[in-house]
Image (spheres, rainbow, N blue to C red):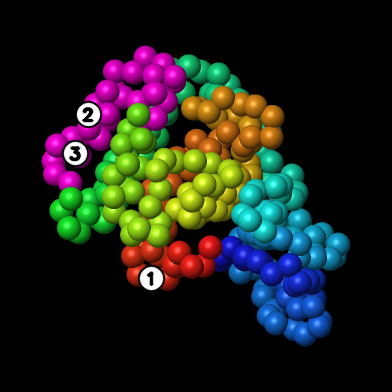
Amino acid sequence: MADLYIQNSSYSLSISDRKLMIKNQERTMLKAISLGLIDNILIFGNSQLSTQLLKSLSRHGIPVFYFSSKGEFLFSMDSFKEADYEKQREQAQASFDKSFCLKMSKRIASAKIMNQLNLLKAYDEQGLFDEEDFKRFKSACESLESAKSISEIMGIEGRIAKSYFYYLNLLVEEDFQFYSRNRSPSLDRFNALLNFGYSILYSCFIGLIRKNGLSAGFGVTHQPHTHHAVLASDLMEEWRPVIVDDTVMSLIKHGDIRGGAF
């Protein structure tokens, strides 16, 4: 099973004989995909989905995530058939357990920092960095063990993130160099790629959370606020370097994406 990405606004999607049908503006059939092969559908732009298709997707528990043409996450559509309210009650209780949240936040932050370190080592093919450069990442993980609050953990993570992106910038070619990590609106090509990837990762975790009967509104590190799936933000943290950052670095390294494409 896999995710289906639709990035052409002229496409229309419908359902026929339990298959998702993709047609272009001229109503020419482009592809037919069995619903059983689809985990999630991600729509970028203004593709049209028929009501019959949306009903079928709901019955099969396949969520649809909508993004702007620039990759900004907008909203999602799914059914509540997978919701497990007893599980969500326990989840809510756990999210208010300070000891539990502190413990889990340390694990997430430590895993993220080590993944950042491993990515830098993997792409430092010219030996720009030495053990002194990498020592701060290991020291940060050690500092996490004695952290007494979530804010202290986030402070440690934030400081090491600045070092991480500083080093990462030294490893990319000139067309993709950046001066700092910035969110929407992206101020450079590299941040645009990261933001696009993080939006997709965020939506995928929302889908996984809902498919497992949990609520995306109760997390352990990020504080809940309106329209923010905090559990998705928590769970995706350690996977940012592994999935998104690594993909972006690989695309640039192998010339699969070039500065002229922006």
Tell whether 82 sits left or right of 178: right
Q: Is the magenta stretch mostly helix, strand or loop?
A: helix
Q: Give the range drawn in magenta.
A: 129-158
| Neighbours of disc 3 within 10 Å: few (<14), some (14-19), many (20+) | few
Q: Label 2's element?
A: helix
Quarter of the rendering occupied by the N terminus: bottom right
Q: Label 1's element?
A: loop
Which residue type does callout 3 highlight? Asp
Identify the residue at image location x=14%, y=44%. 130
> Where in the figure is residue 118, as x and y percent of width and height?
26, 48
Q: How far apart are marks 2 and 1 (CA)?
A: 35 Å
Tell whether 161 sits left or right of 52: left
Kindly identify which numbered label has been placed on residue 139.
Answer: 2
Q: In which quarter of the image is residue 31?
A: bottom right
Nearer the camera: disc 2 or disc 1: 1
Circle nearer the N terminus (3, 2): 3
So how many labels did they put on this image? 3
> Where in the figure is residue 142, as x and y percent of width and height?
24, 26
Circle nearer the N terminus (3, 1): 3
In the displayed image of the protein, which residue is found farthest to the bottom?
A: 28
Nearer the camera: disc 3 or disc 2: 3
| Residue position marked by numbered label 3 in the rendering | 133
Which residue type does callout 1 highlight? Gly
Identify the residue at image location x=66%, y=67%. 6
Circle nearer the N terminus (2, 1): 2
| Residue position marked by numbered label 1 in the rendering | 255
Q: Which of 140 and 220 is in front in this view?
A: 140
